[in-house]
Amino acid sequence: MKLVDEAEINVTAGNGGDGCVGFRREKFIPLGGPDGGDGGSGGSVWIEADENLNTLVDFRHQRAFRAQRGENGMGSQRYGKGGDDLTVTVPVGTVIINVETDETIGDLTRHGQRLLVAQGGKGGLGNMHFKSSVNRSPRKALPGLPGEERRLKLELKLLADVGLLGFPNAGKSTFIRAVSAATPKVADYPFTTLYPNLGVVSVEPHRSFVIADIPGLIEGAADGAGLGSLFLRHVQRTRLLLHLVDMVPMEGGVEATPAEQVRAIEHELQKYDPAMLEKPRWLVLNKADLMFEDEARALAEQVVAELGWTQPWFLVSALSREGTWPIMLEIQSFFDRLREEQLEAEAEAASKTDAD
């Protein structure tokens, strides 16, 4: 199924039930007084993250969600029943935005995480609350308050550890097929990838990570050109970026040199979210199989020197899988070091807390 990563929905919480105007009427008890009960509160609307979902496609068919209304109050000081809450499930990694204010309400990044998006209306007071020494028979009750209503935009940001960047036909889909069980479409024309693909790379039991392939970026992607602008959000969460570069662009394809391709993508990242340039980003020079080994190595070193590249770089052939697995081992070691540093920091913070 193709990924659906955006949707707009309307959520409406239940109205509160109306308060009751009632009087106690029992045999041998004259002037029993007011006994109208309160209305029940309306149900609220919650959004909950579910790891079993991976797309927002269900919201193409259902866009309106309404919680149950509270029951009206009744005589004999009986309260109306509160309306049931409504829970809307979304994939883990969904961001909820208020369309009217463009405010981000929440970001659901864990399974079972819940967010209140529309509060149910409070039930109205019955007339028993308005009795006094000067008004022993009040005929006043309050209506229930309306529930909140919101129009929400849902944006799915994939929770991947590694994100692939590059121009169309840089070999990203071929690369992810080479290192994982993912099977994205591969062809010799631009924009073969029309939606993000996820692949799990298992280095050994209990040591694995998730890699995401997004559609190729072109100049102007951050401003809406091409397909990449729709999916740049999916690499915002990643901890490491792999920048794939086609060292031998196909005829009629990208005319930029490898170094120019890198700088163009960097420019788009800067415009979309400058923080993405602060992430660790490794350079992967692809399609080494189309040249002699010495020629490929010389060209790769020339590109690295022209860019002044200081982070790790690799020369690979995604098609023949040559050089791809060592990158996966390096990535796993990188994440292992991050995990160790995090554990050390947590242990240090805990020891300081105990000392205080």
Image (cartoon, rainbow, N blue to C red):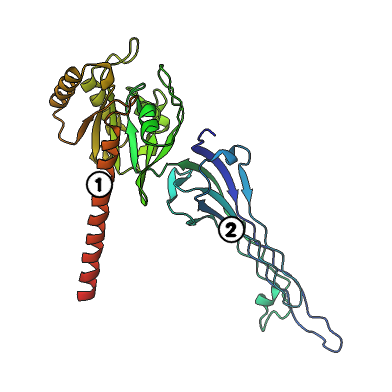
Q: Residues within 10 Å of mark 2 (few under 14, many from 20)?
A: many
| Picture residue at 25% right of the left edge, 46% below the top | 333
Q: Which mark is residue 127?
A: none
| Picture residue at 53% right of the left edge, 40% below the top | 56
Instruction: Please state the horizontal and vertical placement of residue 218, each as a whole percent of the image.
Output: 34, 22
Q: Which mark is residue 44?
A: 2
- Judge left or right: residue 38 versus residue 92: right
Tell me if I can see residue 99 in this picture. Answer: no
Q: Amino acid at mark 1?
A: Ser
Q: Mark 2 or mark 1: which is in front?
A: 1
Number of numbered discs: 2
Instruction: Give the image quarter of residue 197.
Output: top left
Q: Amino acid at mark 2?
A: Ser
* 251 to 19, vertically: above or below: above
Q: Looking at this rendering, what residue extends furthest in the bottom direction?
A: 28
Identify residue for label 1: 333
Instruction: Please state the horizontal and vertical placement of residue 221, each as a whole percent of the image.
Output: 36, 26
Could you tell me which secondary element the residue under label 1 belongs to? helix
Q: Residues within 10 Å of mark 1 (few under 14, many from 20)?
A: few
- 150 or 212, which is in the foreground? 212
| C-alpha separation, residue under disc 2 versus residue under disc 1 | 46 Å
- Judge left or right: residue 48 versus residue 106: right
Instruction: Give the image quarter of residue 268.
Output: top left
- 229 or 176, which is in the foreground? 176
Tell me if I can see residue 142 in this picture. Answer: yes
